Image (spheres, rainbow, N blue to C red):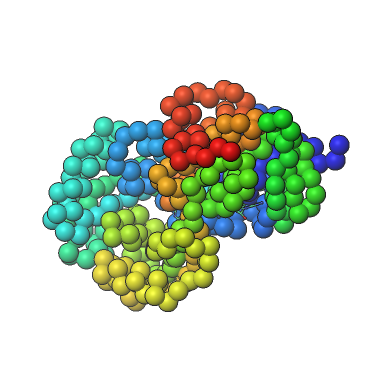
Amino acid sequence: MKNTFDVAIIGGGINGSSIAYQLSKLGKKVVILEKGTLANEASSAAAGMLAAQAEMEHDGPFFQLALKSQAMFPSITNELLTYTGIDIEFVNKGMLKIAETEELATALKSQVLFQQNWDSGIQWLDATLVREMEPALAPTVAGAMFLPNDGHVQPAKLSLAFAKAAEHFGTEIRENTEVLSFIYENGVVKGVNTSAGAFYCEQVVVATGAWAADLMKNTGINLTVYPVKGECFSVKPNKPIVHRSIFSDKRCYFVPKRNGEIYIGATVVENTFDKQVTAGGIATLIEQAVKLIPQLKDAPWERVWAGIRPQTADGIPYIGEHPTIKGLFVAAGHYRNGILLSPLTGKLTAQLLTGQVEDEQFLSAFRIDRSQISIS
Ligand SMILES: Cc1cc2nc3c(=O)[nH]c(=O)nc-3n(C[C@H](O)[C@H](O)[C@H](O)COP(=O)(O)OP(=O)(O)OC[C@H]3O[C@@H](n4cnc5c(N)ncnc54)[C@H](O)[C@@H]3O)c2cc1C
């Protein structure tokens, strides 16, 4: 039969492509169905921080998912370079999570103690040490937690490299192909209907980021995925101003890329799919950025952009099988951490589809029928 595969993956963002890579490496016949073009949504808008420890403050399956995924980056970088020739620009110089007040410094110091359980290299730096490391930071910075393993990558390159590596192992990629509905019989998935006709398969993975709830609602599952717009801008100074990522609790961060650009983000605008960049959003970011790094005001402007993060009601992703439709899986809702989580999301989802999950804690934590479910 035409258009017949083992697995159809819906969504050609970083997670869909990572899943395709892992499954095709296992010998599965995979197709990626993408309504636009590869990596055209959140996966190319991200700053690319691998902030497993800067962003997470409690132990549990989500934190462990983040740590394990972060640890995969050195090997994933090499694998993808070997199979695709794409350098994902993995930079591992660490991150400073800064405190702008004494009160925040006290809170961050207790985080240092917690995070040292997983990485003894994590340290508290007082104001003098912070400015020795990053002299461009404003003298008002009270101190910082130094996270030596929170690096960063070029997210669009990583996303495209996963897709190209999947292609290398036989995955077919169909862009401009929107999935409209699922085909299933007697509680077993058989394929999907798309704008380019039907595709038949034994398993389907919904990896449609912020758009996941829409597709799933007719299957009796109300996923709580909702869109959160983030706007960013970048400058490209003639010589480096900062040397490693800098993260402030006031929702402003700086990520110095290999090409000399500094990505500065990001706003948080809930419940909109509108990717328009607003003057107000960028004005707020610039104000916060220049307060922290005054030299930025003289840096040559590069560009602005926005993307839609996929958030969930409880803040953790969905990775699991539909409770009543066999063969229908979801891997979506990675919010601010989809780049960081993409290597392990690919691996874990491939394990789920092949019935070989290594770490059982992830099965129940990310299941798609947790809490709010309404099964019809
Ligand atoms: C400004 C910003 C900064 C960020 N910074 C970071 C960061 O520093 N570190 C980090 O780890 N994460 C970051 N993120 C989050 C990260 O970008 C996302 O979590 C991640 O990209 C989600 O990937 P995804 O593949 O699940 O979704 P997406 O990249 O959104 O891909 C989903 C794809 O599905 C397609 N699709 C949707 N519906 C259909 C359909 N019906 N049929 C076919 N295709 C469909 C879409 O066209 C899209 O290409 C950031 C996000 C933003 C917006």
Residue 194 higher or lower than 273, as above or below: above
Q: Residue at coordinates 74% horizontally, 50% vertically from top-left?
A: 194
- The percent coordinates of residue 28 (x first, y second) are 70, 31
Q: Residue at coordinates 64% horizontally, 54% vertically from top-left?
A: 38
Which of 325 and 277 lies nearest the eye of the viewer?
Answer: 325
Quarter of the picture containing the C terminus is top right
Which of 130 and 190 lies nearest the eye of the viewer?
Answer: 190
- The percent coordinates of residue 249 (x first, y second) are 28, 56
Residue 292 location, quadrant: bottom left
Which of 230 and 139 lies nearest the eye of the viewer?
Answer: 230
- Residue 78 seen in render: no
- Residue 292 seen in render: yes
- The percent coordinates of residue 116 (x first, y second) are 25, 35
- The percent coordinates of residue 56 (x first, y second) are 33, 43
Relative horizontal placement of residue 222, taking residue 111 as reference (left or right): right
Quarter of the picture containing the N terminus is top right
Q: Residue at coordinates 26% horizontally, 47% vertically from top-left?
A: 146
Q: Residue at coordinates 81% horizontally, 41% vertically from top-left?
A: 3
Residue 111 location, quadrant: top left
